[in-house]
Image (cartoon, rainbow, N blue to C red):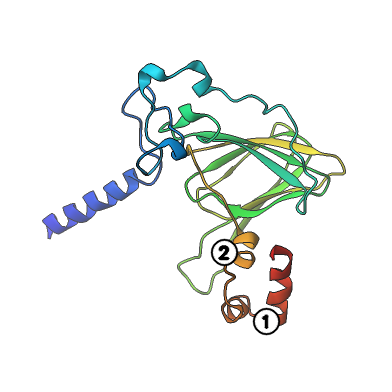
Amino acid sequence: MAAIINILLISYLLQFAYASDPSPLQDFCVAVDDSAAAVFVNGKICKNPNMVVADDFVFHGLNKPGDTNNAVGSRVTPVNVNQIPGLNTLGISAVRIDYAPYGQNPPHTHPRATEILIVVEGTLYVGFVTSNPADPNQKNKLFTKYLYPGDVFVFPEGLIHFQFNVGKTNAVAFAGLSSQNPGVITIANAVFGSEPPINDDVLAKAFQVGKNVVDQLQAPFE
């Protein structure tokens, strides 16, 4: 029995160790563009260290506002391994988020990263929802706050979260994420705008609505 417990404990620890980006084993591993790589790996392969230059570690332009003239009224400017090759294996990235008045960064998740958000301009209503509770009689819990310039809020890895500009002026926030490539799943786009679309019967039953409502929700993404 003791041996079984030890095996289970080791298995758990191994899973925990791989729950986020792996730690680097060298000073840096500057990414090679996928289109130039002969193989595909979980991450990106390394550039020859002798060919690495300072430009591999820099990104210019995060001071420039993003264009918020779109359906949701926000724009995310990412700075991850695709913009800075030197972030490869370092387990960190950043974004700038611009919000028009009453614009939002709609409900979404980052499957590979925790996010820490810093508001520098405007007033944001932000929040995240917990994962499904073990007790089926309980509901997913919502945590929300109103944030002002200088305020900081954390969105745990993988949980659905959002930001909404409740002010009459533009808002700006910056965020750090605990992955070189955190990924993003925008809930509405993924559920109602997939290609090919999810079957109406599936969505109607999942959301407990009629198929006509599903059709209306899918229409903007067609």
For disc 1, the neighbor class at 10 Å (few under 14, some 14 to 19, many from 20) is some
For residue 162, the mark is none
Badge 1 element: helix
Percent of width and height locating residue 167: 84, 44
Q: Which mark is residue 211?
A: 1
Q: Residue at x 54, y 70 (%)?
A: 138
Residue named by callout 2: 140
Tell whether 212 sits left or right of 88.
Answer: right
In the depicted view, which residue is nearer to us: 39 or 71?
39
What residue is at 36 percent from the left and 20 percent from the top? 49
Q: Position of residue 64 (x, y in %)?
A: 73, 29
For the residue marked with disc 1, what is the amino acid? Answer: Lys
Q: Nearer the viewer, residue 104 or 150?
A: 104
Q: Secondary structure at mark 2?
A: loop
Q: Quadrant of the C terminus?
A: bottom right
Residue situated furthest right in the rendering: 168
Q: Which of marks 1 and 2 precedes in the sequence?
A: 2
Q: Is residue 134 above or below residue 77?
A: below
Which quadrant of the view contains residue 150?
Answer: top right
Figure quadrant of residue 130:
bottom right
Q: Residue at x 68, y 75 (%)?
A: 214
**Number of numbered discs on residues:** 2
